[in-house]
Image (tube, rainbow, N blue to C red):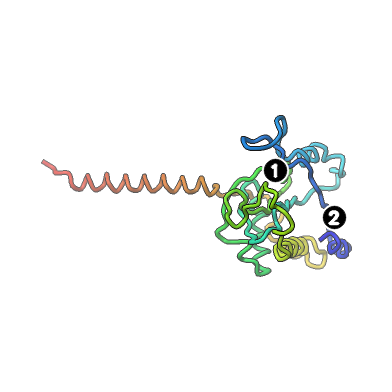
């Protein structure tokens, strides 16, 4: 992707930075991690020193797109809730327009994932995390195991991700196509509740609905002296 975008850099109205973060996954948890470590140490450190990497008086960051767990077999992205809704929504729509409806599903699972995009979102940069369901996914049981290796990487999944990001950049930042704006500047942030919370909400609504029906039925059956 870096090579392809470099060859088109003269046609782009922005710089494209590729950032590689370390110490993302060592945060202490009940089952693993390092005591005293937090999650996303590398990206937090970058954001803490972000002013040293650019001149904020005449430059700004348009967006941060995190590619995390994008190359596995059976690719299916989720609706990650810390992401800027309008930015993530546009990435999904771009993927669907390219024919990748299975990988960018309309009924995507909603979940909040603490990941390297969160520090950028917290400092006001529109941010999106492209990530799969890795915590409860029988089609991808390799997370945090020694089987998370190249044997389970899919060339097709990498192509889906790469072409989607490439097209997104062309749609929004190609000088010859700057009439297309999409959801830019991606400031709308209206996220859905996570899937687990949504199920709880639906159960509560169902209980309330049944209670109303029972109360209404009792009132109708009550004899008036």
Residue density around tag 2, few if under 14, some if 14–19, many if 20 or more, within 10 Å: few
Quarter of the image with the C terminus is top left
Q: Residue furthest bottom?
A: 99
Badge number at residue 172: none
> Could you tell whether 44 is left or right of 225 in the image?
right
Q: Residue furthest top?
A: 36
Secondary structure of residue under mark 1: helix
Q: Judge by depth and name the residue closer to the eye, 149 or 105.
A: 149
Residue 140 placement (x, y as % from top left): 62, 55
Q: Residue at x 84, y 64 (%)?
A: 4
Secondary structure of residue under mark 2: loop
Q: Residue furthest front?
A: 146
Closer mark to the observer between disc 1 and disc 2: 1
Residue 156 placement (x, y as % from top left): 71, 66
Residue 120 placement (x, y as % from top left): 74, 43
Disc 1 or 2, which lies upstream in sequence? 2
> Could you tell whether 136 is left or right of 118 in the image?
left
Q: Which residue is mark 1?
A: 118
Q: Where is 220 relative to 180, above or below?
A: above
Q: Which residue is mark 2?
A: 15
Q: Where is 79 relative to 28, above or below?
A: below
Where, by quadrant of the figure, is residue 76 drawn? bottom right
């Amino acid at each position: 992707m870096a090579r392809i975008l470099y060859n088109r850099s003269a046609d782009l109205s922005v710089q494209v930075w590729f950032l590689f973060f370390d110490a993302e996954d060592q945060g202490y948890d009940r089952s693993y991690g390092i005591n005293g470590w937090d999650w996303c140490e590398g990206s937090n450190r970058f954001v803490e020193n972000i002013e040293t990497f650019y001149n904020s008086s005449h430059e700004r960051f348009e967006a941060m797109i995190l590619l995390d767990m994008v190359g596995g077999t059976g690719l299916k992205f989720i609706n990650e809730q810390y992401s800027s809704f309008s930015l993530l929504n546009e990435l999904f729509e771009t993927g669907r327009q390219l024919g990748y409806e299975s990988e960018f599903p309309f009924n995507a699972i909603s979940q909040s994932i603490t990941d390297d995009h969160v520090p950028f979102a917290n400092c006001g940069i529109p941010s999106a995390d492209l990530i799969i369901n890795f915590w409860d996914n029988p089609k991808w049981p390799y997370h945090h195991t020694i089987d998370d290796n190249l044997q389970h990487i899919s060339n097709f999944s990498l192509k889906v991700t790469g072409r989607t990001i490439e097209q997104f950049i062309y749609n929004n930042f190609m000088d010859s196509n700057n009439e297309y704006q999409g959801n830019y500047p991606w400031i709308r942030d209206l996220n859905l509740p996570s899937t687990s919370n949504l199920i709880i909400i639906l159960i509560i609504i169902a209980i309330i609905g049944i209670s109303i029906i029972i109360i209404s039925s009792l009132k109708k059956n009550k004899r008036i002296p």
